[in-house]
Image (spheres, coloured by chain):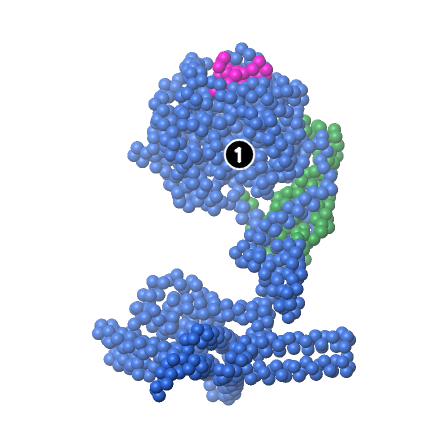
């Protein structure tokens, strides 16, 4: 982690500690979070809302399944033609920017699909029979 | 006051420190030298008593009311606990005495003693006399007949107490029935009266049986009343102004002291009935007096013994008093025997012993032990209460102030029992319970359902062996199982990835985690559920994530003898391997290594290194032809890690703050890629002079440091570390390593297109680092959980990144354990296809890194995934492209992506495909069987996402596998053995079948040659000579149409096609098109599928070793000749 990231974390901690109960997390903290951190927090809260005591085994499994669920939904949403074009581009060494471009051309709403995937995941987990 | 006053100069009897605590504490406080010395000699004991002293400090800081309450609580509790325990103990002793007497009577051992009148005692007479003695000793006054007839008094008492408890429960049940309306009026009255009568009768019998115990309780109550009266009086007098605050506090303390002494006296009185015990104590008092007398005289004789004569006389007097009046000190000694510092604290010594720094460590320890005993006593009492012990219940009834504490302890006990049952699973518990429930005889033993349940639960607890020690283990196992079940449930019913998109799915996984759009979606989802409620979650996660800081970026190079925590596991493994000296740890292997070193040392490379043709190589970087100056001096003693110490190399101390050019060039915005690449390569060659780093290249080549094939190959980190140890003290070895590294670099890049790859900050990669382990440099493997701290560049080539069996990539990944030991070639290839190998200068070291190959779309090397052992999802499918090696391949360079598999891959889907091997290996394929790679899914056990530590590099050498270049109809080369045949002197390596002690060149050394079949289609895998020799890079290829040099090939070899490189060098990702299209390979997704593949017939056969030693030697000679001729 870079010194800048350290500083961000430190600042985030300080803000969190002083956060009054019920107040939303400041956007600047959210912005500083990486995707891994976002999903980790999401899963953590999910487990807490389930009423289950979090543990590393459960965290790990849910994180993995959540990422898979998001990716699966995104890929399945791609039109066939776009999927082929995308795969070909990747095979030809397309950059992330180029991949983004193809996905954008496909018309799928990545943000919404991601959010929906996460929401569905959460709802499914909360609806599971009570864990042992 | 007891003999607790400080006696200046009084010697310290450490044996009696336990009994002498306040006195010793006062000596410390008054700086008596002996006391201070003892304190200094036992500083560690102070740590144990922090809690005890803090309690004392808190007591000392209490106001009147608090002190009263605390003294009341602790004093009453202690006295009660002591009473309870004392009664129990004495009852047991009495019972034992009675049993012993009964036995003697039955054995006819009683009677027969002559009386004064000349007659002899009868057995009965002696029996009765003994009974009386026992009763007198233990305070019992019942006649022998009554004892015999009614059994033990205490057992009777307990039986009555149980009866009383049952009656009370019945009364309670009756009242509940009345409340529920199930009983009323006359019926209720009648039953109530009956129960009341029973209760009265039982209580009366209990009173009769209790005898002394009740009297004892009465005495205690009198003391309590007296204390209460005294405190009231003091309060009144304080209000009247009779005392100052300080005086009042002192008076209160004295009052408590007196009460404590009274309680102790009550105990003392009971104990005094035991004449034998009292006599022992009295004798001890006398002996102490004598000892103190001698000590006083001794001290008086020394200069600094006593300050004044008066003090000496006082000491003599005190000691003599003990000798003359031991009974005077009985109470004090009883207190000490009881090990109760409470009384001494109440005597007013709190102030003196409140400062832990001034206390005798041993005394502090004693006090802590006492408090620990207090705590234990509380828990034991709570357990007794829970079990329904009548005496304990009776105590609780009389001490309601402790009910809350006892309830808490009982609840904690029950919680633990429940937790144990939960961890084992409800079904298992229910089954266990039902078994006992069906046992009527067992159930009948218990008076109530509650008692039965508790008993069964306790048995179950025993069965589970639940304890604090294994609770965590049980819990972890249960959590793991639960998590797995949850994972399965979350997957159930989920829409699968469309079959035609599975390849894309794998390729995109890493991308989505980098995509800002995905991040936006995640943020939206996060906000949707109210981040204000996530404070705890955020804190938890971020705190946990912050712990990972130390693992980010470069591997931490620990200072000497102090490995950093994140590296500990890896480093310890590395250090464990250091001493083995060989991959097997056997002396035979070590000896063989030494032999190899000797053999290699005999071969001079100076002539080779002076060859002008090796002073530069020609490469292509970013479409530009470049001539790289590769001239490096032979070992000149300069190393980033070592420094010359006489004839050997001593490890440099301190941190390795080496700035690499490549590392610096990340910000070289004004440099072209070609310039960056050129500088990078030159730097690499320059660094090859450091034998420690040269080992990286040597490991790639599978050679320790010998340029011809007449050696073993390095196949694991252990061997590499061993070699480095040798080189540390052997100049020739260092030179050889240097030469070897240069040759490897030449082979990798000479005449090749050099791929320059930029990696951005945050990208994860695996890398091999050199770390310092207790003053010895070791190679350690850092797996892909390691994100880059900053942007950095790396270079690679098609040859380096070839996925051919036995190639640089294969050997390297096996050596560092990314490819597990024992992996078949097919499995190895799958793993190779997931990663690209590059070379960089990072963290001050030359490193070989592995980065995800997006074409395979394998698991993103995240922290989470790297910790998991298996992934059994459909997302594991890889889309392996099997490509032909042709000169028409086009490539693209990207700044961020690593290369795909290039022309070393075979992509045919028919059974007639064969592959060519690259020019670094000449192999022989004797196994003609190939299998199609169809729908195979790779599990994570095979994947390199597993932590690749030094453990993965087992003692099995990959040289046991031989690759034959027979017809390979598919890209899957199953169970083919790879031999690293002799290459040219700068490139070829040999892998030795480590199963024997036969040296290379000798018969049966397992060295084979490679044959190239006509259907070889991989241009990079030149068939070379008729011997299948490869590695014929022709320097000076043209820029416009770069042909991967193909030297003389086997006449049966297929003419390689030209490779053309795209003008587009925006990124580096080779697209080796397969004329027949790409092939999507599905990896096995379940262990069963993997096993099926492994167990398939195709995988069972192995290639035969066909070459004779003579053939091998011919090959070597030919290779040497070719090199000498500049071919």
Rendered view: B1032 above or below B484: above
Q: Residue at x 34, y 33 (%)?
A: B729
Is residue B995 shown left or right of residue A59? left
Q: Tell me, what hue is chain A?
A: green
Q: Quadrant of residue B50?
A: bottom left
Q: Quadrant of residue B180?
A: bottom right
Dominant secondary structure of the residues highlighted in magenta in the image: loop
Q: Give yes or no for residue B399 being in the magenta stretch.
A: no
For the residue pair B560 and B424, the one nearer the viewer reads as B424
- The residue that label 1 is drawn on is B820
The chain carrying label 1 is B
Answer few, some or many: residues within 10 Å of disc 1's Cα (few below 14, many 20 plus, some between 14 and 19).
Answer: many
Is residue B645 shown left or right of residue B443? left
Q: Position of residue B399 (x, y in %)?
A: 56, 77
Segment tinted magenta in the rendering:
B1008-1034
Q: Quadrant of residue B38?
A: bottom left
> Could you tell me which secondary element the residue under label 1 belongs to?
loop
Count of number-bearing discs: 1
Q: Residue at x 74, y 30 (%)?
A: A80
For the residue pair B985 and B446, the one nearer the viewer reads as B446
Q: Position of residue A31 (x, y in %)?
A: 63, 46
Residue located farthest toward the top when viewing the structure as drawn: B1051
Q: Tell me, what hue is chain B?
A: blue
Is residue B364 shown left or right of residue B467? left
Q: Give yes or no for residue B1031 being in the magenta stretch.
A: yes
Report if residue B63 is visible in the image: no
Q: Position of residue B1113 (x, y in %)?
A: 42, 17
Quadrant of the image containing the N terminus of chain B:
bottom left
Is residue B920 shown left or right of residue B44? right
For the residue pair B142 and B386, the one nearer the viewer reads as B142
């Amino acid at each position: 982690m870079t010194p800048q990231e350290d500083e961000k974390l430190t600042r985030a901690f300080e803000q969190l500690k002083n956060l009054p109960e019920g107040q939303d997390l400041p956007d600047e903290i959210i912005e500083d979070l990486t995707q891994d951190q976002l999903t980790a927090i999401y899963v953590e809260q999910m487990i807490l809302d389930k009423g289950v005591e979090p543990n590393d085994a459960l965290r790990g499994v849910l994180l993995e399944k959540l990422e898979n669920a998001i990716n699966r939904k995104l890929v399945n949403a791609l039109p066939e033609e776009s999927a082929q074009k995308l795969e070909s581009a990747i095979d030809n060494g397309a950059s992330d920017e180029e991949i983004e471009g193809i996905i954008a051309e496909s018309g799928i709403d990545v943000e919404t699909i991601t959010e929906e995937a996460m929401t569905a995941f959460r709802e499914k987990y909360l609806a599971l029979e009570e864990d042992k | 006051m007891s003999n607790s006053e400080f006696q200046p100069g009084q010697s310290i009897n450490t044996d009696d420190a336990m009994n002498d605590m306040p006195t010793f504490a006062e000596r410390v406080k008054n700086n008596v030298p002996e006391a201070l010395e003892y304190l200094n000699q036992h500083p560690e004991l102070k740590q144990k008593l922090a809690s005890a002293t803090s309690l004392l400090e808190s007591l000392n800081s209490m106001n009147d009311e608090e002190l009263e309450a605390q003294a009341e609580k602790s004093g009453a509790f202690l006295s009660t606990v002591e009473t309870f325990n004392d009664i129990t103990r004495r009852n047991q002793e009495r019972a034992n005495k009675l049993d012993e007497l009964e036995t003697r009577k039955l054995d006819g051992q009683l009677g027969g003693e002559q009386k004064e009148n000349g007659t002899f005692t009868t057995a009965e007479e002696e029996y009765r006399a003994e009974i009386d003695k026992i009763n007198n000793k233990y305070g019992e006054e019942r006649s022998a007949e009554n004892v015999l007839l009614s059994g033990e008094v205490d057992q009777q008492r307990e039986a009555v107490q149980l009866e009383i408890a049952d009656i009370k429960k019945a009364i309670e049940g009756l009242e509940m029935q009345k409340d529920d309306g199930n009983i009323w009026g006359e019926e209720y009255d009648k039953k109530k009266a009956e129960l009341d009568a029973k209760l009265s009768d039982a209580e009366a019998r209990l009173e009769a049986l209790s005898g002394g115990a009740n009297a004892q309780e009465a005495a205690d109550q009198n003391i309590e009343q007296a204390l209460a009266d005294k405190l009231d009086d003091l309060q009144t007098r304080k209000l009247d102004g009779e005392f100052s605050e300080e005086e009042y506090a002192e008076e209160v303390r004295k009052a408590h002291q007196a009460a404590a002494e009274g309680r102790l006296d009550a105990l003392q009185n009971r104990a005094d009935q035991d004449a034998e015990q009292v006599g022992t104590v009295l004798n001890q008092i006398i002996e102490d007096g004598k000892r103190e007398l001698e000590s006083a005289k001794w001290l008086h004789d020394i200069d600094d013994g006593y300050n004044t004569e008066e003090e000496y006389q006082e000491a003599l007097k005190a000691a003599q008093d003990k000798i003359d009046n031991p009974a005077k000190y009985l109470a004090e000694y009883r207190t000490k025997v009881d090990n109760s510092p409470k009384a001494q604290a109440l005597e007013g010594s709190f102030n003196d012993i409140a400062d832990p720094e001034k206390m005798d460590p041993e005394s502090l320890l004693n006090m802590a032990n006492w408090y620990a005993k207090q705590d234990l006593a509380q828990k034991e009492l709570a357990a007794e209460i829970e079990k329904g012990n009548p005496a304990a219940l009776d105590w609780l009834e009389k001490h309601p102030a402790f009910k809350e504490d006892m309830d808490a302890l009982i609840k904690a006990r029950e919680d633990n029992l429940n937790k144990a049952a939960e961890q084992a699973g409800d079904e298992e518990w229910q089954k266990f319970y039902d078994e006992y429930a069906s046992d009527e005889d067992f159930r009948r033993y218990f008076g109530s359902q509650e008692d039965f349940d508790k008993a069964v639960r306790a048995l179950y607890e025993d069965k589970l062996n639940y304890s604090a020690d294994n609770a965590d283990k049980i819990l972890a196992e249960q959590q793991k199982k639960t998590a797995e079940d949850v994972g399965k449930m979350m997957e159930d019913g989920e829409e699968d990835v469309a079959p035609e998109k599975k390849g894309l799915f794998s390729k995109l996984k890493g991308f989505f985690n980098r995509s800002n759009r995905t991040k936006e979606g995640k943020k939206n989802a996060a906000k949707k559920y109210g981040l204000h409620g996530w404070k705890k979650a955020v804190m938890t996660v971020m705190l946990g994530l912050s712990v990972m800081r130390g693992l980010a970026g470069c591997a931490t190079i620990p200072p000497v003898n102090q490995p950093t925590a994140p590296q500990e596991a890896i480093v310890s493994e590395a250090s464990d391997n250091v001493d083995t000296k060989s991959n097997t740890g056997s002396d035979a292997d070590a000896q063989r290594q030494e032999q190899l070193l000797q053999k290699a040392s005999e071969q001079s490379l100076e002539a080779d290194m002076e060859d002008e043709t090796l002073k530069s190589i020609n490469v292509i970087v970013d479409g530009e032809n470049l001539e790289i100056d590769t001239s490096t001096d032979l070992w000149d003693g300069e190393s980033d890690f070592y420094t010359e110490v006489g004839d050997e190399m001593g490890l440099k101390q301190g941190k390795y703050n080496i700035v690499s050019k490549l590392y610096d060039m990340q910000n070289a915005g004004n440099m072209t890629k070609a310039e960056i690449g050129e500088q990078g390569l030159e730097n690499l060659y320059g660094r090859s002079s450091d034998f420690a780093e040269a080992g990286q290249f040597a490991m790639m080549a599978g050679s320790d440091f010998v340029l011809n094939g007449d050696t073993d190959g390095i196949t694991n980190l252990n061997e590499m570390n061993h070699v480095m140890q040798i080189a540390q003290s052997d100049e020739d070895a260092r030179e050889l390593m240097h030469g070897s590294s240069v040759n490897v670099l030449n082979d990798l890049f000479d005449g090749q297109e050099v791929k320059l790859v930029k990696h951005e900050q945050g990208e994860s990669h695996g890398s091999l680092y050199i770390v310092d382990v207790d003053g010895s440099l070791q190679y350690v493997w850092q797996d892909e959980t390691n994100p880059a701290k900053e942007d950095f560049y790396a270079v690679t080539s098609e040859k380096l990144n070839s996925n051919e069996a036995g190639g640089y990539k294969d050997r390297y990944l096996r050596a560092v354990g990314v490819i597990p030991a024992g992996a078949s070639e097919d499995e190895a290839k799958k793993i190779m296809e997931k990663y690209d190998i590059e070379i960089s200068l990072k963290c001050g070291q030359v490193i070989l890194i592995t980065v995800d190959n997006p074409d395979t779309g394998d698991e993103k090397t995240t922290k989470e995934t790297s910790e998991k052992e298996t992934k059994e999802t459909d997302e594991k499918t890889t889309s392996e492209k099997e490509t032909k090696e042709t000169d028409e391949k086009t490539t693209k360079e990207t700044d961020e992506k690593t290369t795909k598999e290039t022309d070393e891959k075979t992509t045919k889907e028919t059974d007639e495909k064969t592959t060519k091997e690259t020019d670094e290996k000449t192999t022989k394929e004797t196994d003609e069987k190939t299998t199609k790679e169809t729908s195979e899914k790779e599990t994570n056990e095979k994947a390199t996402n597993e932590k690749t530590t030094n453990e993965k590099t087992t003692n099995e050498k990959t040289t046991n596998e031989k690759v034959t270049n027979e017809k390979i109809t598919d890209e899957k080369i199953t169970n083919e053995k790879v031999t690293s045949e002799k290459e040219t002197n700068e490139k070829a390596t040999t892998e030795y079948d480590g199963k024997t002690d036969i040296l290379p060149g000798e018969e049966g050394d397992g060295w084979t040659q490679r044959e190239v079949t006509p259907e070889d289609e991989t241009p990079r895998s030149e068939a070379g000579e008729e011997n299948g020799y490869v590695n014929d890079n022709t320097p000076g290829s043209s820029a416009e149409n770069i042909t991967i040099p193909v030297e003389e090939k086997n006449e049966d070899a297929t003419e390689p096609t030209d490779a053309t490189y795209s003008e587009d060098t925006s990124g580096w990702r080779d697209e080796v098109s397969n004329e027949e299209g790409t092939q999507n390979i599905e990896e096995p997704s379940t262990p069963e599928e993997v096993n099926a593949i492994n167990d398939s017939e195709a995988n069972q056969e192995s290639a035969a070793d066909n070459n004779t030693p003579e053939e091998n030697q011919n090959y070597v000679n030919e290779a040497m000749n070719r090199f000498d001729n500049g071919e």
